[in-house]
Image: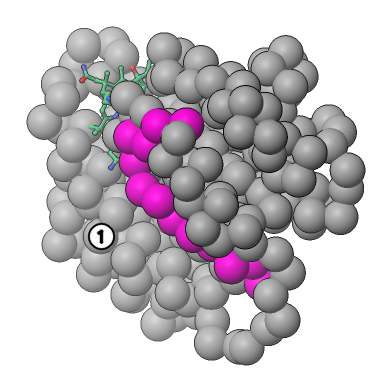
Amino acid sequence: MSQDMFDRLAEAVIKGEIADAGVLAKAALEIGLDPLQCIAEGLTKGIQKAGELFASGEYFLPELIIGADAMKAALDILEPALVGDQVREVAGTIVLGTVEGDLHEIGKNLVGTMLTANGFKVIDIGVDKSASEFIDAVEDARAGIVGASALLTTTMLQQKRLVEALEEAGLRDTVRVMIGGAPVTESFCREIGADGYAEDAISAVDIAFRLIDAPAQQTTS
Ligand code: B1M
């Protein structure tokens, strides 16, 4: 029953069926499925498949865009169910964004949702943000952590730029840097001197809790 629903959610993303994706997400919640499992076992598998079809030349950009839109339609319904409505003490403030030159936002949004669901105040500055835009937001919010997402092998270098810019701004000792995104690795995190790497949205929460209490150091999922 649940596997069938996960498969149907994945299929809606692969085929770019935006309305169906929303309807299925609502139905999944109504029958009591775990929204996180619907995202991990259904939607994420679907968008990964669309990415593979794109890489192999079977899909073109419009199919990828429409697949992402279907995923977002379902996430609009599932994500509020992850956050719930309980009032919590704020665990810490995090500025979150996707780096300059990069428009991928689905993973970043999911990370933001999971952090919010676990008591963090998340300032989401959006996509295609330069190091100085991250820094302005960190200063405005007096954030303890800055989280930078990158999905392209070309734009992950902007995460390095962010670490350097924090150093130049004299903020490196007070702000922890968490990085993530499909091409990013733990060793890249070490190489650029960031403080923590998270592989997915769930481990991002764990890393954020460790970073909020920790002095500058390597923390990985
Ligand atoms: Co793009 N794209 N895309 N794309 N896209 C990839 C990344 C690619 C691998 C596809 C492929 O070829 N197989 C490839 C990159 C190749 C490379 O760099 N080596 C690629 C390409 C080439 C491109 C374009 C250049 C295509 C073109 O124009 N010719 C273009 C670039 C645009 C730009 O950014 N300047 C482009 C555009 C797009 C769309 C706009 C169509 C769309 C994005 C829509 C949107 O976000 N609104 C899109 C999509 C959907 C993808 C794939 C298929 C899926 C990405 C996604 O949303 N995954 C992707 C293939 C893939 O990743 N398998 C691909 C689901 C999401 C839940 O996972 O984002 O990995 P993910 O996030 C995870 C973790 O990575 C982690 O937690 C998240 C949740 O578990 N995480 C963090 C992410 N950020 C984190 C931050 C953290 C911690 C953890 O701390 C701060």
| Amino acid type of the residue tagged 1 in the rendering | Ala
- Residue 50 visible in the snapshot: yes
Residue at 52% across, 31% down: 181
Relative to 71, 169 lies left or right: right
Determine whether 115 is above or below 134 in the image.
below
Name the one closer to the observer, 33 or 93. Answer: 93
Ligand 1 closer than 8 Å to the CB at disc 1?
A: no
Crowdedness of circle 1 by 10 Å Cα count: few (<14), some, many (20+)?
many
- Report the front residue among 92 and 4: 92
- Colour scheme in use: one colour
Residue 89 image-quadrant placement: bottom right
51 up-or-down from 67: above or below: above
User: Is residue 78 inside the magenta stretch?
Assistant: no
Quadrant containing ligand 1 reads top left
Which residue is found at the position 16% from the left and 41% from the top? 66
Residue at position x 51%, y 16% in the image: 157
Residue annotated with mark 1: 73
Q: Residue at x 23, y 51 (%)?
A: 70
Name which quarter of the figure residue 87 lies in: bottom right
Residue 59 position in % (x across, y down)? 18, 22
The percent position of residue 137, horizontal first and vertical second, equals 48, 51
Task: Give the percent coordinates (x, y) of residue 135.
Answer: 52, 42
Magenta-drawn stretch, dominant element (helix, strand or loop): strand
Start-end of magenta stretch: 118-131
> Can residue 196 be seen?
no
Hey, which quadrant is residue 54 in on the image?
A: top left
Label 1 element class = helix
